[in-house]
Amino acid sequence: MAKLKVTQIKSTIGGKQNQRDTLRTLGLKKIGQSTVREDRPEVRGMIATVAHLVTVEEVD
């Protein structure tokens, strides 16, 4: 199964609470931090919620 590398590139300051919670659920706490997640519909939905705060790349 494909994996996605999600990297936080912007701050959550001034953002909505659900966006902060979504980043925390993805495992991101600081700008520049990355996590690798499986490419699943649930993860894609979380990424869509915070698309303006993260970058996503496919990893094998």
Image: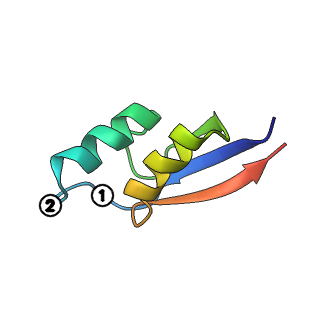
Mark 1 Cα-neighbour bin, 10 Å: few <14, some 14–19, many ≥20: some
Residue type at mark 1 is Ser
- SS assignment at label 2: loop
Q: Report which quarter residue 21 is drawn in.
A: top left
Q: Where does the image place residue 37, in percent across and percent down from the top left? A: 62, 35
Relative to residue 25, is residue 34 drawn left or right?
right
Which residue is depicted at the point 79% across and 41% down? 2
Q: Report which quarter residue 12 is drawn in.
A: bottom left
Query: Residue 42 or 17: which is nearer the viewer?
Result: 42
Residue type at mark 2 is Gly
Q: Which mark is residue 51?
A: none
Q: Where does the image place residue 31, in percent across and percent down from the top left? A: 40, 52
Q: Where does the image place residue 29, in percent across and percent down from the top left? A: 36, 39
Which residue is depicted at the point 40% across and 67% down? 52
Residue occupied by mark 2 = 14
Residue occupied by mark 1 = 11
Which residue is depicted at the point 14% across and 61% down? 14
Residues at discs 1 and 2 in contact (Cβ within 8 Å)? yes
Relative to residue 36, is residue 54 drawn left or right?
left
- SS assignment at label 1: loop
